[in-house]
Amino acid sequence: MSYGVCMRLGSVVFVLPFVLSCHTARATSEKAVDSPAATSPASRAAVARVGSDPGHAGDGTPLTPAKGDRLAAFAAGCFWGVEDAYRHVPGVVATAVGYTGGHTAHPDYEAVCTHKTGHAETVLIEYDPKRIPYEQLVRVFWKIHDPTQANGQGPDIGSNYRSVIFTFDSEQAGAARASLAAEQKSLERPITTETLPMGTFYKAEDYHQQYAERTGRHGCPIRVPVDTL
């Protein structure tokens, strides 16, 4: 969505346009500017083995991971790049993107982009705790985005792009808070990340799912190469 700022210099009025990005246009535009992914053949092979049905997620349906697996959920800006990052993390079994943390039932992408639903773009993760501890997933979360930016990441501005760790139980909540406190010690600016109990998860539209992997486009790049995660 585009907005403008008017400035008056003498008798002349200038309109300076700027854009607050909601990435519907990125999904369809042939002119999208994409950053190349830093992926090795081994990394791409690992991603190909990651599933797309964490907890059998649907449009607000109950979440149930496979036996022995657990669930995690993170909001860290545009969910295309965040999902792509976690699909490169060993121990992640499946991922999907969607909306949670708000008050509107059964939202679609256009509604979430109005910033009136309260929902955040979120990546739902199913992982094998025998292969990766929850604390490592949280460390990846800090690496891939700027937790000191409130209600946005880079050019993506709005509450739907806010930083949130959604927790599934008291153990995750305690680990998330401890990790946040430790991360804050390394940063000068205050962390804006919320830690909230996981609510109803609404799986996003199909064209958002595994976007970077399907299209080869990386219009929502993360802060570090995926091969370093």
Image: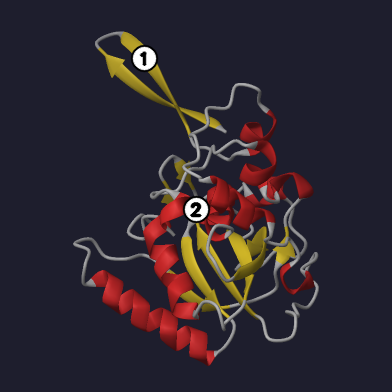
- In the visual, does 11 lie left or right of 56? left
Residue 112 rendering spot, x and y as whole percentages:
65, 52
Closest to the observer: 148 or 90?
90
Residue 197 rendering spot, x and y as whole percentages:
56, 80
Closest to the observer: 162 or 102?
162
- In the visual, does 10 lie left or right of 13? left
Q: Quadrant of the C terminus?
A: bottom left
Looking at the rendered structure, the kind of residue marked 2 is Gly
**Marked residue nearer the N-terminal end (2 or 1):** 1
Tell me the tag on residue 14: 1
Badge 2 is on which residue? 77
Q: Write down the quadrant of residue 12 in the picture.
A: top left
Which residue sits furthest front?
Answer: 42
Residue 52 at least partly seen: yes
State yes or no: discs 2 and 1 in contact (Cβ < 8 Å). Answer: no
Residue 98 rendering spot, x and y as whole percentages:
67, 59
Q: Residue at x 57, y 88 (%)?
A: 169
Residue 151 at least partly seen: no
Which residue sits furthest top?
Answer: 11
Q: Residue at x 36, y 65 (%)?
A: 192
Looking at the rendered structure, the kind of residue marked 1 is Phe
Residue 40 rendering spot, x and y as whole percentages:
51, 46
